[in-house]
Image (cartoon, rainbow, N blue to C red):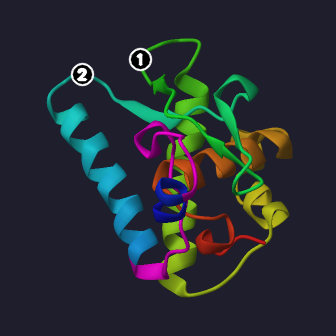
Amino acid sequence: IADLKSLTSVDSSAIVEVAEMNSTEVVEGIEAVAVRIAQQVLAKRGFALDIPSRAASNQIYVPELDRIVLGNKRGQRNFLNVKESRKAAITTRVLQLLHSVLMKRIHITKRDLFYTDVKLFVDQSESDVVLDDVACMIGCTRSNLHVV
């Protein structure tokens, strides 16, 4: 972000920052999401997850950095919405599995992640997409999630 401010006219508040994080920072990010979910559930509102949009319409090319970055558009996965409830459930399951992996200090493959709950994920592409969403949500790289 600092490089972006000094090199370009792109407003740095209009992009999603993804940074290298250590395991402790990633675990704290996952736990912060879990706390937000718990607070929403205890308030009897169900829960909704705020996810940065990775759609092409939200990608910004920064020529000075020769890099594509995500804009600040966000979407929600609302567990109480019938169309979104399955994806919200998959997202919470992936968060749970990643937390466990990080706490055990192990690394897994995307395929390992899929096989931990085949009945829920059905197809590996579903767990792969959610994995990338979680990385954006936490603000870290996929490798920081200990998934290769």
Residue 12 badge: none
Whole-percent x, y for residue 101 in the image: 58, 75
Q: Badge 2, how many Cα within 10 Å: few under 14, some, many 20+?
A: few
Q: Which residue is mark 1?
A: 80
Residue in the image at 60% along x and 69% along y = 145
Please say whether residue 68 is one of the residues in the magenta stretch: no
Residue in the image at 14% along x and 28% along y = 43
Front residue of 70 and 105 = 70
Whole-percent x, y for residue 10 in the image: 54, 40
Extent of the magenta region: 7-24
Q: Is residue 31 left or right of residue 1?
A: left
When asked about the image quadrant of residue 56, the answer is top right
Whole-percent x, y for residue 76 in the image: 47, 25
Q: Is residue 141 above or below residue 66?
A: below
Q: Is residue 120 left or right of residue 90?
A: right
Residue with the most extreme top position: 82
Residue in the image at 67% along x and 50% along y = 132
Please say whether residue 14 is one of the residues in the magenta stretch: yes
Quadrant location of the C terminus in the rendered image:
bottom right
Q: Main secondary structure of the magenta part?
A: loop
Residue 45 badge: 2
Secondary element type, mark 2: loop
Whole-percent x, y for residue 28 in the image: 34, 68
The amino acid on which the numbered mark 2 sits, given as a three-letter code, is: Arg
Q: In terms of sequence position, does the residue under pointer 2 or pointer 1 come before the other?
A: 2
Residues under numbered marks 2 and 1 in contact, where contact means CB atoms less than 8 Å apart = yes
Q: Badge 1, how many Cα within 10 Å: few under 14, some, many 20+?
A: some
Residue with the most extreme left position: 43
Residue in the image at 41% along x and 60% along y = 30
The amino acid on which the numbered mark 1 sits, given as a three-letter code, is: Leu
C-alpha separation, residue under disc 2 versus residue under disc 1:
8 Å
Secondary element type, mark 1: loop
